Image (cartoon, rainbow, N blue to C red):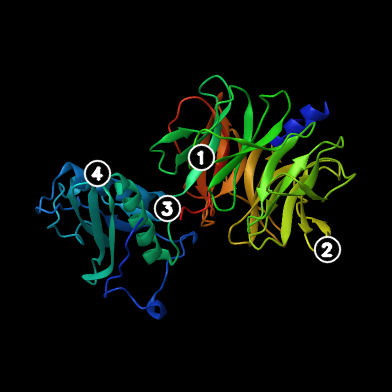
């Protein structure tokens, strides 16, 4: 199968507000035993989320039900939690939770006053009959959903020792308008936001390290130029690089001070270290074929990228102090699109196997790869969740291209969103602060 992955195909074409409080019942840090949600043998934690009670004591208000449903969706998204179907207890809170198989219950309440709102909840350990944690959030009424998701992420931390990712976002490219433009949505797919309006081909969205801006490449001026837009507004887009040829797929350094971009101004696509204004600091690769798809290590000291210097696309690692480079992948004839795990221990990448592209992980030291995707079609553009526990991707199958996700242990592969059109080039944001 002589077909290149998205960035290599492009190369070929160009060459041709919350208040937080901890319940006194929370366990001391030294006593905690956190869940390893990547363990293959781990059973899911069963959690019930009854309707939140309003200030008048009403257990069945629409607002209380909506809050509970969002909490349930956010918890379930993390993969290791199974939600008790609310129809099993008819929305009532005074039930035998243990008989329903629940390990924990989220007991919450809310109060609204004018334009303000308070949401609070406690996590009940059913077996021990103890409240393990409490959270209280206060904000404007229109911040309700954000407060709810903050609560979800705090509850996930109670289980795993690390905050959840329900407030993160995924950027992607969609052709719903007939043109490929950049869009963004929260991980629950509740609200899709259009980012670009160039009415032309846009590709490879990339978040800055702080998640506040999004870079992408567009052909709307006749050349593949690189742009960036701040996400707190929707009117201004700034050019980062308009050099002749390719200006593509920046990898932003963890400290937010620089980026590595693929440029083909010299003929062959190479990696360049640049400042955030688009000024070239240094050319990192030279006379070594096609060099694309850079991804920084979390400590900023190394870089993984793709090169066909060996004759076919393979993945390499560069030490940014010594500039020494080593080849990482040797299995398979074509490996591309590497992304360095937020935990720093491995990469995820796309490999060609049996005529189709699949998603693999590999320790950064090298060695044996692990396939995490399964099923028919082609899996491309893998991107890590900010906690390093999930991998999003695009999947081509039966004439459609959709966004999906899988847990790092290869379980829970599913379609992420039910959206019209085709979606490609997913990019997971850093955690929202």
**Residue lying farthest to the right in this orientation:** 287
**Disc 4 packing (10 Å; few <14; some 14–19; many ≥20):** some
Q: CA distance from mark 2 to mark 1?
A: 38 Å
Q: Is residue 23 left or right of residue 233?
A: left
Question: Badge 3: few (under 14), some or many (20 or more) residues near its Cα, within 10 Å?
Answer: some
For label 4, the residue is: 66
- Mark 3–mark 2 distance (CA, rounded to whole Å): 39 Å
Seen in the picture, residue 109 relative to 279 is either above or below; the reply is below
- Where disc 4 sits, the SS reads helix
Crowd rating for badge 2 (residues with CA inside 10 Å; few <14, some 14–19, many 20+): few
- The answer to whether residue 189 is visible is yes
* Residue under label 3: 78
Q: Which residue is mark 2?
A: 322
Proximity of marks 1 and 3: CB atoms separated by less than 8 Å: no
**Residue 404 tag number:** 1
Figure check: 220 above or below 267:
above
Residue ID at (57%, 42%): 214
Q: Regarding mark 2 in the picture, which secondary structure is present there?
A: loop
Secondary structure, mark 3, is loop
Which comes sooner in the sequence, label 4 or label 1?
4
Of the two numbered discs 2 and 1 in the rendering, the one whose residue sits closer to the viewer: 2
Q: Viewer-nearest of labels 4 and 1?
A: 4
Left or right: residue 205 versus residue 111 is right
Q: CA distance from mark 2 to mark 4?
A: 55 Å
- In the rendering, at what x and y percent does residue 229 appear? 57, 39
Q: Nearer the viewer, residue 278 or 145?
A: 278
Name the residue at the bottom extreme.
30
Q: Nearer the viewer, residue 198 or 307?
A: 198
Estimate the spatial distance between the alpha carbons at disc 1 and disc 3, rounded to whole Å.
14 Å
């Amino acid at each position: 199968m002589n077909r290149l992955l998205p960035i290599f195909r492009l190369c070929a074409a160009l060459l041709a507000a919350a208040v937080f409080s901890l319940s006194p019942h929370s366990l001391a840090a030294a006593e905690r035993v956190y869940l390893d949600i990547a363990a293959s043998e781990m059973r899911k934690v069963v959690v019930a989320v009854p309707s939140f009670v309003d200030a008048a004591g009403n257990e069945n208000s629409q607002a209380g039900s909506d809050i509970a449903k969002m909490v349930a969706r956010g918890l379930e998204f993390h993969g290791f939690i199974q939600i008790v179907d609310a129809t099993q207890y008819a929305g009532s809170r005074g039930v035998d939770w243990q008989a329903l198989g629940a390990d924990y219950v989220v007991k919450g309440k809310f109060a609204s006053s004018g334009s303000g709102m308070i949401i609070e909840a406690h996590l009940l350990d059913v077996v021990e009959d103890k409240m393990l944690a409490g959270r209280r959030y206060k904000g404007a009424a229109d911040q309700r959903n954000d407060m709810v998701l903050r609560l979800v992420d705090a509850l996930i931390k109670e289980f795993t020792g690390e905050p959840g990712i329900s407030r993160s976002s995924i950027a992607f490219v969609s052709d719903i308008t007939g043109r490929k433009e950049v869009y963004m949505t929260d991980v629950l797919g509740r609200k899709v936001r259009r980012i670009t309006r160039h009415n032309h081909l846009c590709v490879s969205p990339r978040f800055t390290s702080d998640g506040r801006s999004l870079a992408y490449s567009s052909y709307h001026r006749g050349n593949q130029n690189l742009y960036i837009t701040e996400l707190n507004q929707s009117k201004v887009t700034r050019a980062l690089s308009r050099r002749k040829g390719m200006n593509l797929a920046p990898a932003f350094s963890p400290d937010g001070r620089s980026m590595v971009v693929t440029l083909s101004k010299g003929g062959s696509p190479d990696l360049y270290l640049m400042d955030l204004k688009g000024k070239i600091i240094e050319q990192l690769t030279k006379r070594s074929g096609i060099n694309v798809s850079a991804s920084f290590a979390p400590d900023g000291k190394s870089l993984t990228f793709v090169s066909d210097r060996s004759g076919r696309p393979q993945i390499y690692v560069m030490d940014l102090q010594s500039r020494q480079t080593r080849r990482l992948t040797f299995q398979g004839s074509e490996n591309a699109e590497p992304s360095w795990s937020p935990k720093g221990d491995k990469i995820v990448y796309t490999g060609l196997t049996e005529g189709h592209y699949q998603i693999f992980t590999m320790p950064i030291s090298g060695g044996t790869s692990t396939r995490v995707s399964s099923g028919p079609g082609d899996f491309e553009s893998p991107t890590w969740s900010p906690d390093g526990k999930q991998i999003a991707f695009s999947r081509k199958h039966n004439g459609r291209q959709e966004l999906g996700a899988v847990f790092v242990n290869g379980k829970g592969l599913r379609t992420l969103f039910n959206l019209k059109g085709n979606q490609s080039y997913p990019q997971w944001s850093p955690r929202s602060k």
